Image (cartoon, grey):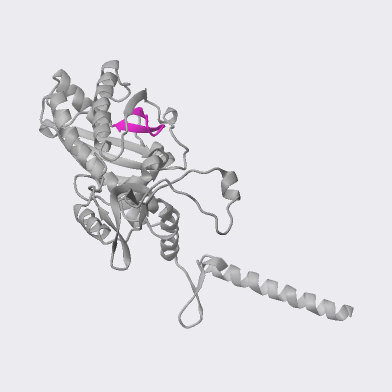
Amino acid sequence: MAETETKAGDAAADEWAAALEAEEKQKAAGGAVTPAADVAVGEDGQQRILNQDEIDTLLGFDVKKDGAGGDEQKDGIFAILDKSMTAYEKLPMLEVVFDRMVRQLSTALRNFTSENVDVSLDSMVSIRFEDYLNSIPLPALLVIFRAVEWENFGMVTVDSSQIYSTVDVLLGGRKSPRATRVEGRPYTTIEQDIVKRTVDIILAEMTSAFEPLSPATFHFDRLESNPRFATITRPGNPALLVKLRIDLVEDRGGMVEILLPHTTLEPIRDLLLQMFMGENFGQDTVWEKHLGKELRNTNVEIEAVLTEKTVTLKDVMALQVGSTVMLDCTQDDPVTLRCGGIPVTTGTLGRVDDHIAISIRDPIKRKKE
């Protein structure tokens, strides 16, 4: 028995020594030891080692795409993690609302600056709130506004280029092609006041844009310069980021970003999910005509009531087979026609052949507007 255990131990030791020797040879040859997780099975049934490029593609890391600086679509595990954001992008009515807002905002800013202003919708994406806060370049001016009817908050970010361009236009600054900020200098009170007035115009036009869909009033709440003090929702919550490009005269201007957390949009989410059918926001005249035509072919039940009588519960309990209930009416009294419990018209009771008939004598009562 002891001899058998000794032989088994020697065999295990030899196997372990052979594995260590093979690993040392691989290191000496310049190769890296590949974990078992990086081994794939080829078409011929043999194991194949995944290279670094294949591992990066599987995990979603692509150095070439990252170095290009573009907005390429994410792959691999990152695409799976970001899949939860896709559902929040399917709000067709938001595009209509902000398209209307862009047209109105262009006119409002022209009146405000007395210059030619062109506002365009750059992009509409869903992003996590924490990721957006980390992407804001400092220093920045963040305006927190309150949606009164929705009982929640939103945020407007104005970049430095737009701030200095607006200041130059309003205060008669230099006609430089691009506004440059002075590094290390915080925004002055005048600049903050101009940003507040600009954002008030944006909020007023956004209120007007949401009016046909759902009444919403956006009010200025506070102005922050530190993104950490501008927390209006939980870091992991998704939010809608709308980027507006404002072009002023002589190639000046900048970006204005409007952030609406999806918790803010939740009260009108059903309205935002509907498709846009003309300027009336969802009213389809073709469907209305078809519905009206089909309603005329609908079968409804008509009741002919000669009279009604109120009796006590004691009299009802005393009714037996053969009892007679006397009604205070005659055959010449008018008969009331009801549809769904609503009186429609009146008529006179009569007879046609072997059928009891009612001759309508009053026009149908229609609901007054």
What secondary structure do most residues of the magenta stretch adopt? strand
- Place of residue 161 in the rendered image (x, y in percent of width and height, measured from the top left): 23, 31
> In the image, 161: left or right of 326?
left
Q: Is 227 placed above or below 69 here?
A: above
- Place of residue 41 in the rendered image (x, y in percent of width and height, measured from the top left): 50, 76
Quarter of the rendering occupied by the N terminus: bottom right
Q: Is residue 135 visible?
A: no
Q: Along the line of sight, which residue is nearer the eye, 172 or 61?
A: 172
Q: Is 42 placed above or below 62 here?
A: below
- Place of residue 347 in the rendered image (x, y in percent of width and height, measured from the top left): 28, 51
Q: Number of numbered discs present? A: 0
Q: Along the line of sight, which residue is nearer the eye, 58 or 240?
A: 240
Q: Which residue corresponds to the image point at 25% horizontal and 30% vertical from the top-left?
A: 202
The answer to which quarter of the image holds residue 226 is top left
Q: Along the line of sight, which residue is nearer the eye, 6 or 109?
A: 109
The answer to which quarter of the image holds residue 107 is top left
The answer to which quarter of the image holds residue 37 is bottom right
Q: Is residue 77 visible?
A: yes
Quarter of the rendering occupied by the C terminus: top left
Point out the stretch of residues depicted in magenta. 141-158
Q: Which residue corresponds to the image point at 21% horizontal and 42% vertical from the top-left?
A: 99
Q: Is 26 placed above or below 153 here?
A: below
